[in-house]
């Protein structure tokens, strides 16, 4: 029986407080802009975008807390706070520069680095939304430490020569960097840190099955928004030179892109935490990510092609950009459609007779043949049921020869819905609490990488737990079927028994 989780009271009023604070910052920036101060930092589009993103993160934090995902809720709260800090530092920087205050330099330096923490926090929020463990993952610590260091180094080593005077952050000549090699090294580490969680989550998603695969895929798409935002920032620099795009316009576009990435990430986090794996919703998330990447590629290539001094004429440039749009956009649309279908596909698994753990003796002679040659780590444990003759549920799966067979489910069985890890019966084979969590994730369709991602443990630890589970359930290797499938069937049989 799952334990009820009470929402965190402090988070319930967070959206209201965030909205009021963000509104005050927007009004202050508007007043400074009307007085002729601040340049692009006071542009209404950028300020409003950051304010909306902060409120969206606060709403997501409240919803995540109410659903029991407290770690994700805290990280979403941090994301909202970091976006508010970005707005507040903009107000402080513009005001101190306008007043000629001696703290103007440090205020501008702090503001110029405030865009980094939101990128880290939007990734961590999405990743935490699909985890069930209570331990902070090493990947989370690495991302937090590296990007925190990048924020500090950027604030200490870079100085604006003429802040807000027509030289925004994407104009390299407007900043002076001390100890440039140190800054470059930290930048490289920061980029690597932003790629860690997307790679980890995509790997876990593609190695898992059905609902687990879809949830991890949604979280992976959300985490991918951060590196895409960095790519967009780099493209803005290219758009300025050699693209000759107005710098202030590019800087406002970056603020809007950062805000959009934050809103997208928290929406995905809420979706993944709720286990919403409908094909249409997953397809929307995946296609949004893929098309955003395609758009960045087209914009970057188009900027280079259309740069001043290009040998191509206007007609040739238009044709090249149009061809790029069709090829890259069409490829992204088709590719993301296939990826979304893969993430939401229901796997076919071998049908096995009802099993009981040691003591019941039923079905323990079945084997452990790998479901796919060369991929012993593949998870085929998601038992999928369809409606058989007479309305009875039946399991569809390949037999030993690879042909599809159907085995009737026990009388009265309905469609099986994944049961949370906390609902795993304590009586299953004398398993420990952690082993029951591993077995629950296995039965839901997670691969070893997917289990490790959700429970915040290493894959080696997952492998050790699985070996212990197989021993305790008396599941020996050999024969036609896979021990993972039979272990999942045991879990399903016991999970639906009245308790």
Image (spheres, rainbow, N blue to C red):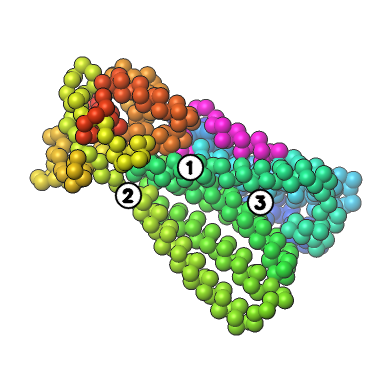
Q: Looking at the rendering, which quadrant does residue 382 occupy? A: top left
Residue at (33, 23) in percent of width and height? 469
Q: Are marks 2 and 3 in contact (CB under 8 Å)?
A: no
Task: Find numbered disc 1 in the image and state the secondary structure of the residue it sits on.
Answer: helix
Estimate the x, y position of residue 247 in percent, counting from the top left: 74, 64
Task: Find numbered disc 2 in the image and state the secondary structure of the residue it sits on.
Answer: loop
Nearer to us of marks 3 and 1 is 1
Instruction: Return the residue nearer the eye: 169 or 178.
Output: 178
Estimate the x, y position of residue 152 in percent, counting from the top left: 74, 40
- Is 423 one of the magenta-colored residues? no
Residue at (82, 57) in percent of width and height? 174
Query: Which of the numbered marks, if any, corresponds to residue 345?
Result: 2
Residue 437: in sight, yes or no?
A: no
* Residue stretch in magenta: 129-149
Location of mark 1 (residue): 201
Location of mark 3 (residue): 23
Estimate the x, y position of residue 321 in percent, counting from the top left: 57, 74
Task: Find numbered disc 3 in the image and state the secondary structure of the residue it sits on.
Answer: helix
Query: Which of the numbered marks, if any, corresponds to residue 245?
Result: none
Alpha carbon separation for disc pair 3 and 1: 35 Å
Nearer to us of marks 2 and 3 is 2
Residue at (67, 62) in percent of width and height? 236
Q: How crowded is the residue under tag 3: few (<14 C-alpha within 10 Å), some, or many (20+)? A: some
């Amino acid at each position: 029986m799952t334990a009820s989780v009470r929402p965190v009271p402090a988070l319930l009023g967070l959206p209201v407080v965030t909205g009021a604070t963000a509104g005050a910052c927007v009004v202050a920036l508007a007043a400074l802009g009307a007085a002729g101060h601040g340049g692009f930092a006071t542009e209404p589009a950028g300020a409003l975008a950051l304010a909306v993103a902060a409120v969206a993160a606060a709403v997501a934090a409240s919803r995540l807390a109410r659903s029991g995902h407290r770690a994700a809720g805290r990280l979403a709260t941090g994301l909202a706070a970091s976006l508010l800090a970005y707005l507040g530092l903009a107000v402080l920087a513009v005001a101190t520069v306008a007043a000629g205050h001696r703290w103007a330099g440090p205020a501008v330096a702090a503001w110029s680095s405030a865009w980094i923490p939101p990128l880290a926090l939007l990734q961590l929020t999405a990743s935490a939304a699909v985890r069930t463990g209570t331990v902070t993952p090493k990947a989370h610590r690495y991302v937090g430490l590296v990007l925190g260091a990048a924020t500090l180094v950027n604030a200490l080593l870079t100085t604006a020569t003429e802040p807000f005077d027509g030289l925004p952050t994407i104009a390299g000549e407007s900043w002076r960097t001390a100890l440039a090699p140190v800054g470059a090294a930290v930048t490289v580490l920061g980029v690597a840190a932003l790629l860690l969680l997307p790679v980890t989550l995509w790997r876990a998603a593609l190695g898992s099955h059905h609902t687990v695969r879809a949830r991890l895929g949604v979280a992976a798409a959300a985490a991918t928004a951060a590196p895409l935002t960095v790519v967009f920032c780099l493209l803005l620099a290219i758009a300025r030179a050699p693209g000759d795009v107005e710098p202030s316009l590019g800087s406002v576009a970056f603020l809007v892109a950062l805000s959009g990435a934050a809103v997208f990430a928290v929406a995905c986090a809420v979706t993944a935490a709720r286990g919403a794996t409908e094909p249409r919703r997953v397809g929307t998330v995946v296609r949004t990510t893929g098309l955003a990447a395609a758009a960045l590629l087209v914009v970057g290539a188009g900027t280079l092609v259309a740069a001043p001094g290009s040998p191509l004429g206007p007609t040739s440039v238009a044709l090249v950009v149009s061809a790029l749009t069709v090829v890259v956009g069409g490829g992204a649309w088709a590719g993301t459609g296939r990826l979304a279908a893969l993430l939401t596909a229901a796997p076919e698994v071998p049908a096995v007779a009802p099993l009981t753990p040691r003591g019941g003796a039923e079905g323990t002679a079945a084997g452990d043949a790998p479901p796919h040659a060369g991929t012993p780590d593949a998870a085929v444990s998601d038992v999928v049921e369809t409606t058989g003759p007479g309305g009875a549920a039946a399991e569809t799966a390949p037999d030993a020869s690879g042909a599809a067979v159907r085995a009737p489910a026990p009388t009265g069985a309905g469609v099986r819905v994944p049961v949370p890890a906390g609902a795993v019966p304590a009586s299953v084979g004398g398993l420990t609490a952690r082993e029951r969590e591993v077995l629950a994730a296995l039965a839901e369709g997670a691969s070893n990488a997917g289990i490790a991602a959700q429970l915040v443990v290493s894959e080696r630890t997952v492998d050790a737990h699985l070996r212990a589970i197989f021993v305790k359930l008396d599941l020996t290797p050999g024969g036609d079927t896979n021990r993972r499938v039979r272990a999942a069937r045991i879990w399903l049989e016991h999970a639906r028994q009245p308790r």
